[in-house]
Image (tube, grey):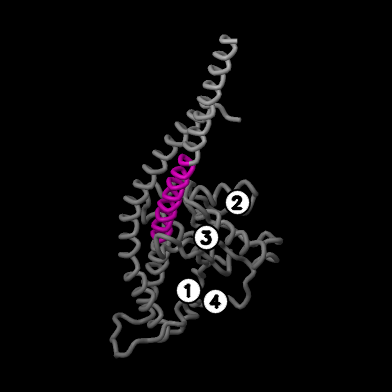
Amino acid sequence: MATLKDIRVRIKGVKSTQQVTKAMKMVAAAKLRRAQERAIMARPYAAKLKEMLGSLSLKVDTSNNPLLSGRSEVNKVLVILITADRGLCGAFNTNAIKLAHKLINEDYAALHSKGNVSLICAGSRGFDFFRKREYKIVKGYSSVFQNLDFNTAKEMAEIASGMYLRGEVDRVVVVYNEFKSVLAPNLKDEVLLPIAAETTSVKESGGDYIYEPSPSAIIDVLVPKHLNTQVWKIMLESNAAEQAARMSAMDSATENAKELLRGLNISYNRARQAAITTELSEIVAGAEALSN
């Protein structure tokens, strides 16, 4: 049975942990506000750019642009995995890693067995997981979310598009957590390349437009912008979802510490009462022995 000293030490430790989790929750909440604003602000531009590209693709022969036309066979796949740099955010990292692992080992199992599935990992957690298991990693980004920069997203988009144009991959898939709400992120896997997989479903809006210099020339300019913007939006979404998950996890940890303290205080009071009762019994027994 735990002594009073043991219980006091444990109560002190739980209180210290509770203070840390409460502080981390407040920090995550502050970061979430900024991250959420950036993610929401990026959505309209990315959506409109995607809509414009889809509308223009209906007016030109997309086979002239390799990034807009799919391959007849998919023999090589690149998976872009977006995770966090740190833990303490619930199942945020675990769910994204599990989905990427499932894609590689189940959906593309035949290609993976031939060594035809490669990875780009943004975020230390996903990078460390697949690096230790000796997966084929083209590029890994550690500590990328500590100072989130558009140039990182641009570099990732350029690596993916370059590999696609050189024929090194036939499909590029992105796995990430989209910011949906504070309570739960939306885990997604999207086809980034070929772009036709995303834009063919976009219907042309009503109205006649005159394009200068030409739809095909505009498409050539819009395609890299679209890729850069989509990857940047995905990273912003993931960052906002990470802060929301961390805030929720730290809130749960703080509440659990509160429940644990309540139980420890009850145990401490019972042990203290038992010790007092024992002392009184010993005093009474000693008094009776002296009187006899």
Q: Residues within 10 Å of mark 2 (few under 14, many from 20)?
A: some
- In the shown orientation, is residue 65 left or right of residue 219? right
Q: Secondary structure at mark 1?
A: loop
| Residue hosting label 1 | 195
Disc 1 marks a residue whose amino acid type is Ile
Give the Cα distance between marks 3 and 1.
Answer: 15 Å
Q: Within the magenta stretch, is there residue 140?
A: no
| Residue hosting label 3 | 80
| Residue hosting label 2 | 130
Q: Secondary structure at mark 2?
A: helix
| Magenta stretch, residue numbers | 235-262
Give the Cα distance between marks 4 and 3.
Answer: 18 Å
Disc 4 marks a residue whose amino acid type is Gly
Give the Cα distance between marks 4 and 1.
Answer: 8 Å
Q: Secondary structure at mark 3?
A: strand
On the image, the x and y values in percent for residue 19 come to 39, 38
Image quarter of the N terminus: top right
Task: Give me the residue at 55% from left, 26% from top.
Answer: 3
Disc 2 marks a residue whose amino acid type is Phe
Disc 3 marks a residue whose amino acid type is Ile
Task: Give me the residue at 56% from left, 22% from top.
Answer: 281
